[in-house]
Image (cartoon, grey):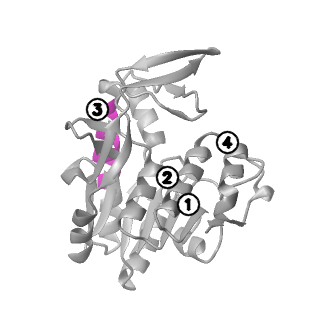
Amino acid sequence: MIVIKIGGAEGVNLDAVCLDVAVLVQSGQRVLIAHGGSAETNQISTQLGRPPRMVTAVSGYTSRYTDRETLEIFAMVTSGKINTLVVERLQRAGVNAFGLSGVDGRVLVAKRKEAIRIVENGKQRMLRDDYTGKIESVNAALLHMLLDAGLTPVVAPLAISPEGVALNVDADRAAAMLAGAVQAQQLVILTNVPGLMRAFPDESTLIDHLPKSGLEQALSFSEGRMKKKVLGAAEALDLGVSQVIFADGRVEQPITCALQGHGTVIS
């Protein structure tokens, strides 16, 4: 069982990814796909007059501030446009893909962060009316039912709260939770860089292999969005996933290359 996380940054070769998924599925491999949608959401929300607002928590992690209107735009883009287009490409490649978000069937249940403490202009303040959440459980039974029926699930990064409120969740950490829940052996995280670098963006500093014990140190030198990927990798390994690979989603056969050890292999 392999979980593939398709990054939402610009540059990922979606056609190549889907063709590579088809090779895996046709060989009998069970595959579950999670995806992001940050770049597309930024573009469309700006066109709609709601440019993204990024905030930095006191922990140092940067995320999208999500009020209710932003949540609805995020859902429209990720669960609507992006999820449908990924499923379309997979179907064209011969994969019977099944698109859904974490809201559907309570695939992802998350606790809402109704208020977050952020740092803005050097000062701490509380930001309320936020529709983001931290995933607490995964409906693995539903995912296994789809997989057992010969379908390839494609999951958009939305979750539902216990009270029934839709929430924006981090796609990398969602992929980690999904991988742990379905007992995947590998989680492949595809993005628009070749892997984890000690000195971003210098690709000559690419780290080929990193033991789990080195993840805490990796957090200290990871730039922006890679911090959450590193955190997601740690969570996946804690949940029993044997191997996490950060790999380049811009190349031909990106998954095949990743499974051959190209990128950053964490185990």
**Disc with the residue nearer the chain's start (2 vs 3):** 2
State the extent of the magenta-drawn residues as a range.
71-84
Separation of disc 2 and disc 3 at Cα? Answer: 20 Å
Q: Secondary structure at mark 3?
A: helix
User: Which is more foreground, mark 4 or mark 1?
Assistant: 4
Q: Are marks 4 and 1 in contact (CB under 8 Å)?
A: no
Badge 3: residue crowd in 10 Å (few <14, some 14–19, many ≥20) = some
**Disc with the residue nearer the chain's start (4 vs 3):** 3
Badge 1 amino acid: Gly
Separation of disc 2 and disc 4 at Cα? Answer: 16 Å
Badge 4 amino acid: Glu
Q: Which residue is mark 4?
A: 223
Q: Which residue is mark 3?
A: 72
Q: Which residue is mark 2?
A: 7
Q: Is residue 150 left or right of residue 90?
A: left
Q: Which residue is mark 1?
A: 249
